[in-house]
Amino acid sequence: MARLGTELAARIGRALITESNSSFQTRSWNPSLEQTLHKIGFRDSLNPSLVARVIDPHLLTHHSLALGFFNWASQQPGFTHNSLTYRSVLKSLSLSRQLNATESLLKQAKAQNLTLDSSIYRFVIDSLIKSGKSQMAFSVFNEAKSQSLDLGTETSNSLLASLGSDRCFKNAMEVFDEMNNRGVGFSTIGFGVFIWRLCRNGDLGEVLRLVDAVKRWNSLINGSVIAVLIVHGLCEASRTSEALRALNELRIRGWKPDFIAYRVVAEAFRSLGSVFDVNEVLKMKRKLGVAPRSNDYREFILCLITERRIYEAKELGEVIASGNFPMEDDVLNALIGSVSTIDPYSAMKFFHFVIGKGKFPMLLTLSNLSRNLCKHGKIDELVEGGRVREAYEVLQEMRKKGLDPDISIYNSLIEVLCREDLLRPAKRLWDEMFVIGCGGNLKTYNILIGKFSEIGQTEEAMRLFNHMLEKGLTPDATTHISLLEALCQETKFETAVEVFYKHVNHDIMPAQNILKTLILNLCGKGYFLVASKFLCDLSHDVGHLDAHVVLLKCLADSEEVPIAVEHVKQIRGNSPSILQDICTKLLAFSSSSSNPEPILRLLQTLSQECVISIDSGNDSWKHV
C-alpha cells in the first residue's frame, strides 16, 4: 500500500511539473494544473500523507507548485492539513526563501494548534539567516523555544553568528544563554563571530565570562582562532590595553594566542606611537606565542564564506595577509571570488597578495573577479595607476602557465579600456583574442561597435558588424541601435537601411522596434522625405504602424504638414487597413500630450483634404 502511495505521489508531481512547463503561466498555479489533477482522478486517495509525499521530494524546488498544490488540497471536501503537510510545504518555501508565504503558513499552523517538529523551525531559521533576516530568524527561534524544541547545534550557532554579525547583541545573548542552559555545543564559527563583534561593545570582563562559560561545555573550539578575533575586536574599538591583557587571560585559560594575535596587538600599539608597548608585545610573542596553523584558519575562513559571513572572512583574511602569514591557495581563491561581490577593492588586495607570492589565481576566480568589478563599476582599478600594463601581464602570465583566458576576462578588460577611451590597447586585446583562438562573442562585438559608433568611426563599426555576421553571430537591438544612430548622424542613409534589412532577415519583431529608432534619427536630422519614402517602401509585415505614428508626430511637431498629407496618401494607397489604427493612435497621442495642437491641426488638415474623415458619433477615424 505504501509503495502504491509513493508511485501515485511521483505521478502527481511529474504531471504538475510537466503541465507547468508547457503552460504560458510557467511556475505559477493556474486552472490548467487543477484540470491535470482532476484527470488523474485520485480524490478518493487524497490524504495528508499523499500531499506531503507529492511536495517532498517532487515539488521541493518548485515552490509555486508546492504552495498551489497545498492550497488546492485544503479546498477539497473533507480534507484537513496536518503537521506532515505543513512540514513539506514549509520546507519547499524555505529552500526557495519565500519569506512572506513562510511567515503566513507558520501563523496558520499556530492558529490551528498544530505541533510542528523542530526540523521545520530549522528549515525556516536557516532560510531567514541566508536571506539576511536575523531578527526574523530570532522571532522564529523564540517560537521554537516556547515549545521546548531542540534546534540543534548547527542552526543555533548559525543564528548566534548572524545576530552577532548584525550587532543584535541583546538577542544574541538570549540565544547564547539558551544554548548554554541546554548544553548545546558552541562552534568556532558561532561563538567566534559573536564574541568578535561583541568585543567592540562589551567590556573585557563580560567577554572573559562568556569564554569561561563556553569552555565548561565545549573543548572543540579553536582557542587560538578565537584569541585572534577577541584581540582584533578590542583593538578595532581602540581598547588596545585591554587587548594586551586579553592575551594573558586567554593563555591562562588554555586558549593560546598565536603569532597573528600578538601581531594584531603590536600593530595597534604601533599605530598609537607607543614603541615601548610594541617591544613588550613582541617579547611576549617570542616567549609565549605559538606558530599559527594555516589549516585552522583555512577551515574557519572557508566556513565563514559557506555561512555567507563574507565581511568577517574579508576582515580576517586582511589581518592574515597584512602580516604576510601563509594562506592556502583554495582560501585565497575563495576570498577573491566571494569578497569581490561586496568589496571589489579589497578583492584586488587579495589578488595582489597572490601575485606577490609568485602564484596565480584560478581561471574561475579571475572570471568572477572581472565580472564583479564590472558589476560594481570598480573595474577602473585595472587601469588606474598603470594597471593596463598589469592587465596585459596577467594575461601573459596565464598563457605562460598554459591557461586559456576566459572570454569574460577579455570582455571586462575591453569594456573598461573603451570606457577610458584607450582604443589602441582595446584593439590590441581584440587582435590577441583571435591569435590564441578565443573568438569574440556578442558582448565583445557590442562593446567595440558601440564605442566606434560613439566616436564616429562608422567604417570600423561596420567592419565589425559584417565580421560578426560572417561568424554566424546574430546582432541584437543594442548592436543595431548603436550603428543606426551613428550612420544617421553621418547621413549615411543607404548604409543605415542596409543594416536595418539585415536585422529584418534575422527577426521581424525586434526589427519593428528598431524601426522606430531609425525613423526618430532620420527626423531628428530633418530628413523627413527620406523617412517617409523608406517607410512606404517597406512591406506591411515590417512597416509597423507605430513607426508611421512616430513619423507623423514628428512631421506635425515640425509643421511639415504637406509631407504628412502625402505620406498618409501613400499609406492609403499601399496599406489602407492600418490607416484607421494610425489615426486612432495619433488622436490618443494628442489626448495625452502636453502640446496636442500640432497633431490636432494635422488631423484637421487631413480631414479637410478628404484624406481621412472623422465620425463624430463615435470619434473613430476612417480612411476615405
Image (cartoon, rainbow, N blue to C red):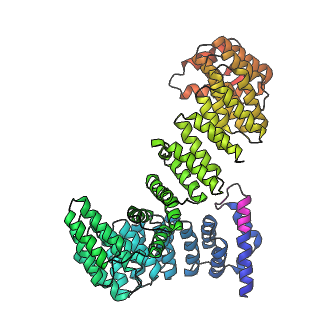
The residue under the point 37% across, 69% down is 163
> In the figure, 411 relative to 351: above or below?
above
Q: Position of residue 31 (x, y in %)?
A: 69, 61
Q: Quadrant of residue 286?
A: bottom left
Which is more toward the observer, 31 or 233?
Answer: 233
Is residue 368 visible in the rendered image? The answer is yes
Q: Position of residue 475 (x, y in %)?
A: 71, 39
On whether residue 20 falls in the magenta region, the answer is yes
> In the figure, 208 relative to 555: above or below?
below
Which is more toward the observer, 567 or 164?
Answer: 164
Q: Position of residue 202 (x, y in %)?
A: 25, 71
Q: Is residue 108 left or right of residue 575?
A: left
Which is more toward the observer, 507 or 535?
Answer: 507
> In the figure, 409 relative to 122: above or below?
above
Q: Is residue 207 left or right of residue 158?
A: left
Q: Quadrant of residue 58?
A: bottom right
- The magenta-colored residue range is 15-29
Q: Is residue 264 left or right of residue 591?
A: left
- Image quadrant occupied by the N terminus: bottom right
- Image quadrant occupied by the C terminus: top right
Q: How many marks?
A: 0
On whether residue 213 falls in the magenta region, the answer is no
The residue under the point 50% across, 59% down is 354
Is residue 624 visible in the rendered image? The answer is no
Q: Position of residue 363 (x, y in %)?
A: 60, 58
The residue under the point 35% across, 72% down is 259
